[in-house]
Amino acid sequence: MMKTQILVLAALLSISMATFNNVGKTPAMGWTAYDKFVCSKMDEDEIKKQVGLVKSLGLDKSGYQYVNLDSCWMYDKRFQGELVGDVDRFPSGIEAMSKYVHDADLKFGLHLSSGGLTCNKKPGSQNWESSDARRIAEFEVDYIRYDVCYANKTPFPAETDQVRFERMQDALKSVERPIYYAIDTLGLGDFQSWANKTGNSWRTYKDVQPTWKSI
């Protein structure tokens, strides 16, 4: 009986996580640039190398589907209100990087921030949610990690995490592409009361560092 109850609970949790966009019915598995490189070596050649390793090591056959760029994929400012890729890091463009990942039968992820800036002081999405959701859909993104860096800093209004994250959820609903929405509150605030209705997954703790002690 207990085993049946656990299986039913797991199924209900999966459904609640996937309600708004029909993705995320199982946990997202893959590789992300941030823990290893932060910004130091996050570029087109390195990402292609990691795509090759995911394939050659057979990780994709074990369910590792995503290859995710992080904060330093974008230029330091917007152009005509749009996010643009850093051409020094990605000379072929973010669209080409996305296509490269998809051509390897993998899924492509990017990072955005719910604040005015990202942690590495790139453009944040606060008050730009609709245009940024449309932009990443144009890049054919499959996954976004959305965090709390520089949230509620001047000149942006003071808002709760819930309000900001729900606003991006609404923006993602408005685009035709289904995009896995990973909420990253660093485990701060009362995320337990709203995150499971807003994102496909959510962070419950601060960043994990690439050390056994941290894990």
Image (cartoon, rainbow, N blue to C red):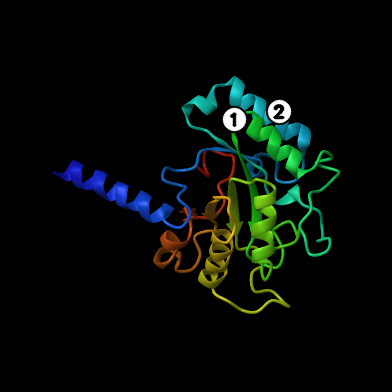
Residue 111 at x, y = what percent?
65, 52
Q: Residue at x 77, y 32 (%)?
A: 45
For the question of whether residue 42 can be seen, the reply is no
Q: Is residue 36 above or below residue 81?
A: above
| The disc label shown at residue 105, or none | 1
Q: Is residue 146 left or right of residue 18?
A: right
Near-viewer residue (126 or 137):
137
What type is the residue that disc 1 sits on? Answer: Asp
Q: Residue at x 36, y 52 (%)?
A: 15
Q: Is residue 47 left or right of residue 197?
A: right
Residue 42 at x, y = what percent?
74, 41
Q: Residue at x 58, y 54 (%)?
A: 176
Q: Is residue 145 left or right of residue 80?
A: left
What type is the residue that disc 2 sits on? Answer: Lys
Residue with the mark numbered 2 = 49
Circle 2 — which element? helix
Residue 43 occupies quadrant = top right
Circle 1 crowding by C-alpha within 10 Å: few under 14, some 14–19, many from 20: some
Circle 1 — which element? loop
Residue 205 at x, y = what percent?
49, 55
